[in-house]
Image: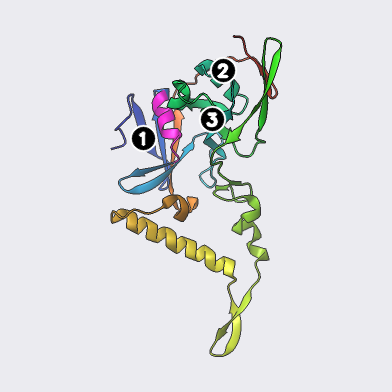
Amino acid sequence: MLAQGFRGDFSVGAINFRHVFIKFTLEEDYTKLWIKPIWFVEGFPMWVFKWTPTFNPRVESPIVPVWVRLPGLPIQFFEREALFSIARLLGTPLRTDVSTATLVRPSVARVCVEINLLEPLQTEIGLGFGTNVVIQRVVYERLPKYCGACKHLGHAEEECYEKHKAKVPVRPVEKDGQQVPGPAREDLRVKLDAQRAQRALDDRRRGKSVAFAEMLPVHTLGQVLVVLSRTVKRRVEMCSTQIRLSL
């Protein structure tokens, strides 16, 4: 089932009961799997991560693919190599969308870029060509949150239950007319989220349609780690957040 839609060879191996390692020979197959965050295999959700030499099965990688918009980009920069040169100032470019490649939407260019959520994100970049310099605005679409405390996707560090659980107050509850210590609302919410996630999985297995993006916490998913067997190297002239392009 996994082979459907892939053109080249690939290998699959289990690292542990939650992690599957997939190695591709073609960059287009690797990119196709990598840019889609969740895949369903036999009805089970699998979250896709990029493998790195520092892989740790107890934490989730902060490296994610994100679609980036470049509104008002000069049309002469819509050519693929120019777009990829610009995108390298933000991260590792993966692909452009069809509307950008065919210039049917010249008002904005879209590029999928691999970024590290722990690093500062550029919101403006300088494009130099000839004697002209253009300040280009950068818009990130559906930028996921990453917690540096528990090393999980889905929430920011200031929202982390794991980091702040020692600070959660214990509120009394009524039992037989007497007050007894009970869990705080935040603790009950964690349990409720887990129950909702389990119901979502059960509904999925029974063929019901559910909103997994909202209901399923990331840490309950299985994980797929992808890697390309060869490294594609490209040279580009750049410095800091500015790039000079030759037309």
Left or right position of 199 against 181: left
Q: Do the residues labelled 1 and 3 touch (CB within 8 Å)?
A: no
Is residue 24 or residue 120 the one in the foreground? 120
Q: Percent from the top left, x then y, of residue 63?
A: 55, 36
- Count neighbours of disc 1 (C-alpha within 10 A) and say few if under 14, some if 14 to 19, many if 20 or more: some
Magenta range is 28-37
Disc nearest the viewer among 1 and 3: 3
The first of marks 3 and 2 along the sequence is 2
Distance from label 3 to label 2 (Cα)?
A: 17 Å
- Pick the front one: 89 or 231: 89
**Quadrant of the rendered image containing residue 36:** top left
**Which residue is label 1 attached to?**
12
Side of 197 where 158 appears, left or right: right
Does the magenta run of residues contain 82?
no
* x 64%, y 51%: residue: 157
- The residue that appears at 62% across and 50% down in the rendered structure is 156
Q: Is residue 112 left or right of residue 132?
A: left
Amino acid type shown at disc 2: Phe
Look at the picture and state if 143 lies above or below 93. below
Residue wearing tag 3? 113
| Residue at which label 2 appears | 77
Residue at 45 percent of width and 34 percent of height? 34
Between tags 3 and 2, which lies in front?
A: 2
Residue type, label 3: Val
- Residue toward you, 77 or 176: 77
The kind of residue tagged 1 is: Val
Pointers 1 and 2 in contact (CB under 8 A)? no
Number of residue marks: 3
User: Does dot 1 land on a helix, a strand or a loop?
Assistant: strand
Disc 2, SS? helix
Cα separation between marks 1 and 3: 25 Å
